[in-house]
Amino acid sequence: MSSHKRAPNIVLIMADQLAPQFTGAYGHPLVKTPHIDALAARGMRFDSAYCNSPLCAPSRFSLMSGQLISRIGAYDNASEFSAAVPTFAHYLKLMGYRTCLSGKMHFVGPDQMHGFEERVTTDIYPSDYAWTPDWDAPGERIDKWYHNMATVKEAGIGAATFQIDYDEEVAFHAKRRIFDYARDNDQPFCLVASFIHPHDPYVARQEWWDLYDPDEIDMPIVAMGPDEHDGFARRVMDGIEASTVALSDAEIRKARHAYYANVSYFDCKVGELVQTITEAGMLDDTIFIITADHGDMLGERGLWYKMTFFEHSARVPLIMAGPGVAKGSAQNACSLVDLLPTMLDLASGTGATLPAIGMPVEGRSLMPLARGESDSVDEAIGEYCAEMAGHPVFMIRRGDHKYIACDADTPLLFNLADDPHELTNLVNDPAYEAVAKEFAAEVASRWDSVKLREDVMATQRQRRAIHAAMEAGAAEAWDYNPPRDASKQYVRNHMDWTVAADRYRFPRAD
């Protein structure tokens, strides 16, 4: 076992589209997440953690870089993640870490590494500009890849899906890599294992489906029709066709049933990785971080998937467990941009020198909160510049208040302490006049919404032109192809098989 004097290993396990409200660890009465529960019981659960953009790629680029999406042009699922933006993988490598990505990070562009020393799987989604929205025609659906209600209506049981295939591969390679690190345990490592579940389609294997009684599946707490929504939420509802395609209670229950089942499937993968770290003798030297890129409305307010700043879409689970992490829960608002400074704090906690920071980061370290200390910062900042919006949408969560603003819409102001389901817009309430004015002034000073919209639309036009040329054969695909050399695997004629057997065995025979 390695010495505590060196920096801890970091294992970041990500789900895709996992709302914390739908986990046992965050108090859901039905959803079974025993492995996440166990980490939360011995570590810190962050109860007000948010993504910085409620969509896959932008959220992940924020997490990797510690930057808000407007700083790095990471507007949508086809925005390029610039190779010139430093990530936590770059910095950790400079601090003596081995770094590995197993699974999804939705990198877009020719750089498919972004500082990782190695990737052991391909990605699950396209790495080119195919999924570029069109704010020049914001009301038009792009049927090839826009969500719609077919995904809900087709929910159910399946023995295999592309998502199950993918997550089985992600777990296999992550576990294999852990043992590789254990065999050559001379440096700390950062392993990111990033799964696609419980992201729709809502199709689950029978074994996970059977964990739940169909009659016990709870319905959404808040039911809202199209005309009850604010402007942006109505555009999302129209865009996913939830405002025009009726769903029966049975269809909603079936989709939620499959989602719960897939949350338990993801939890099982968390358990496999914790078990592997334990078997590798590294449990006392490893920090686990459990999170997701965004949530899922799952029928709340008549909405599905993500793309809004309501709690079920914008909040993420965030649990840390390991050496130096206290047991408890942290109430301060925080967000995924905080993970880069948190990891650097972890890496430097044993005296390692911080590298030169190539770009000022937006977040702050969450280690004081993780140690059970107080933190004067209680805020999360969000931006959405993707499909169905037409204009940038901004969120500020500070203390009990959440403010959402978009040039095309009336602002929203909620007091989450009094109104956790976000039913009462206080923006015109005389009692909140000063609070609303303060938030409005902050939005105006923090963002130039008109210029940002022009930038978003300009990049969309650029990317559509390049994508058309790539479709015509102008360039090789950017999709990551993991290197494999079978001539060096297992036992080959240039090896002594007894030497190979000894090298692979862990722990080694006495």
Image (cartoon, grey):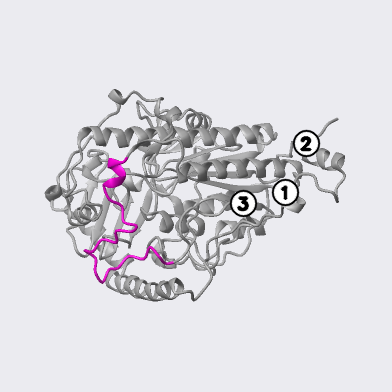
For the record, the magenta segment spans 129-154
Instruction: Indicate the quadrant where residue 468 lies.
Output: bottom left
Query: With respect to residue 159, does 240 lie above or below?
Result: below
Distance from the alpha carbon under mark 2 to that under mark 3: 21 Å
The answer, for residue 363, to whether it is visible in the render is no
Q: Main secondary structure of the magenta part?
A: loop
Residue 181 appears at what percent x and percent y? Answer: 71, 44
The answer, for residue 253, to whether it is visible in the render is yes
In the picture, the disc for residue 187 is 1
Query: With respect to residue 219, does 225 lie above or below?
Result: below
> For the residue marked with disc 1, what is the amino acid?
Gln
Say which residue appears at 26% left-offset and 72% top-offset: 136
Mark 3 or 1: in front is 3
Q: Nearer the viewer, residue 222 or 439?
A: 222
Kindly state the secondary structure of the residue where label 1 is placed. loop
Q: Is residue 469 magenta?
A: no
Q: Is residue 130 magenta?
A: yes
> For the residue marked with disc 2, what is the amino acid?
Arg
Distance from the alpha carbon under mark 3 to that under mark 1: 19 Å
Residue 351 appears at what percent x and percent y? Answer: 68, 50
> For the residue marked with disc 3, what is the amino acid?
Val
Is there a contact, CB below 8 Å, between mark 3 and mark 1? no
Q: Earlier in the sequence, mark 2 or mark 3?
A: 3
Label 3 Cα crowd, 10 Å radius (few <14 / some 14-19 / many 20+): many
Kindly state the secondary structure of the residue where label 3 is placed. loop
Judging by the rendered image, the residue that carries numbered circle 2 is 505
Instruction: Indicate the quadrant where residue 407 lies.
Output: bottom left
In the picture, the disc for residue 120 is 3
Say which residue appears at 76% left-offset and 53% top-offset: 487
Mark 1 or 2: in front is 2
Label 1 Cα crowd, 10 Å radius (few <14 / some 14-19 / many 20+): some
